[in-house]
Image: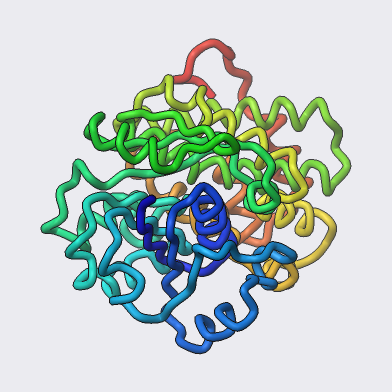
């Protein structure tokens, strides 16, 4: 049994806490809010984010840094990407016993364009970069919290660390594969959310299954091109953290990013849909970061640009999809031509 501290109390943080507690580990969710921690302690359920699922006996919640992390060998960061840096500033001095950190957040920092593991490394400069990893894959929190089987990819720079953490996270309902391509695993998980918003556009506008399949396929090409330009291994995007995560996020109504796109195509505005969802939708801020990165690296990303245009420039979902259809004709075979 391991003591695992988890930064966050949202849907994914709570789900990971439940999953790991069920397999025999002692998990503690750390909350920045004492009131929120007290609420979850009393209820023993996170009705806001993971309704209907009771906390296992070996799972607790605390606003105390000492209670959350003093005995933790492993810490998992599972907060929205926009708050990762501040959360790390808050907890950095309490991680003296920690040997490994896993980032389960799927996003890119808007201002800097940095991946979440890079943000963690910056905020914990004395922590060995080999011991900072990422977890990503086709992981819809409601299904995992309900006990349904799933799988994911865990990436660390050091294979020995990856094997050790893999054995902690894996169970008979959560199969974890390992990789050393931290960039690829992280970028696949972050960028696919942008494509999922567009998949919601297509379904919400009633454009059909054929164009949705084409759109998702071209979206994978687009993700892969940017990933390669940023130093990732292109093969990683054909795995769980790339194609796997992309498929489930684009086709499941449990996906918040898909539901955001669907709502916008149904005539609602961004603020209204986000308010209805009541949780973070990572694809929106990630599209802002991705547009900047594509410009800096001179990578053509029409799907990302189209999604950004709907979210932040007032464009119509149906119009941007139609515009994608009349772009200059290209060969399909090469990643260089999208």
Residue 196: image quadrant is top right
The percent coordinates of residue 100 (x first, y second) are 26, 50
Q: Say left or right for 154 vs 141.
A: left
What count of labels does the image hold? Answer: 0
Residue 177 is situated, as x and y percent measured from the top left of the image, at 44, 29
In the displayed structure, 123 sits above or below 158; it is: below
| Residue drawn at point x = 26 percent, y = 69 percent | 70
Image check: 301 left or right of 69? Answer: right
Determine whether 330 is above or below 62 in the image.
above
Residue drawn at point x = 19 percent, y = 41 percent: 130
The quadrant in which residue 244 appears is: top right
Query: How far across and down, in percent of the image, does residue 86 sit?
Result: 33, 72
Q: Nearer the viewer, residue 121 or 269?
A: 121
Q: Residue at x 70, y 44 (%)?
A: 320
Indicate left or right for 10 with 290 as reference: right
Residue at the left extreme of this rendering? 126
Image quadrant occupied by the C terminus: top right
Residue 255: x percent and y percent?
Answer: 69, 50
- 41 sits left or right of 297 in the view: right
107 to 207, vertically: above or below: below
Q: Is residue 264 visible?
A: yes
What residue is drawn where x is 11% and y is 58%? 126
């Amino acid at each position: 049994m391991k003591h695992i501290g988890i930064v966050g109390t949202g849907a994914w943080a709570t789900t990971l806490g439940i999953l790991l507690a069920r397999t025999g580990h002692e998990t503690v969710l750390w909350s920045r809010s004492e009131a929120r921690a007290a609420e979850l302690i009393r209820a023993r359920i996170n009705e806001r984010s993971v309704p209907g699922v009771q906390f296992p006996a070996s799972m607790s919640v605390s606003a105390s840094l000492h209670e959350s992390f003093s005995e933790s060998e492993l810490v998992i960061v599972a907060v929205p990407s926009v708050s990762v840096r501040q959360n790390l500033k808050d907890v950095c001095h309490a991680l003296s016993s920690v040997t490994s950190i896993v980032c389960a957040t799927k996003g890119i920092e808007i201002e800097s364009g940095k991946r979440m593991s890079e943000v963690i490394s910056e905020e914990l400069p004395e922590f060995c970069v080999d011991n900072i990893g990422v977890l990503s894959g086709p992981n819809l929190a409601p299904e995992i919290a309900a006990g349904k089987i799933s799988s994911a990819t865990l990436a660390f720079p050091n294979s020995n660390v990856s094997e050790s953490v893999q054995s902690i996270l894996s169970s008979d309902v959560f199969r974890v594969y390992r990789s050393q391509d931290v960039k690829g695993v992280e970028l696949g998980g972050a960028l696919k959310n942008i494509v999922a918003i567009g998949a919601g556009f297509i379904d919400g506008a009633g454009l059909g299954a054929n164009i949705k399949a084409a759109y998702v396929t071209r979206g994978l090409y687009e993700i892969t091109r940017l990933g390669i330009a940023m130093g990732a291994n292109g093969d990683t995007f054909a795995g769980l953290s790339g194609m796997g995560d992309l498929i489930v996020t684009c086709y499941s109504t449990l996906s918040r990013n898909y539901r955001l796109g669907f709502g916008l195509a149904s005539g609602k505005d961004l603020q209204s849909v986000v308010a209805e969802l009541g949780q973070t939708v990572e694809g929106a801020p990630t599209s802002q970061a991705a547009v900047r990165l594509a410009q800096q690296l001179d990578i053509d990303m029409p799907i990302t640009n189209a999604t950004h245009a709907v979210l932040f420039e007032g464009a119509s979902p149906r119009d941007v999809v139609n515009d994608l259809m009349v772009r200059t004709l290209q060969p399909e075979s090469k990643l260089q031509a999208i």
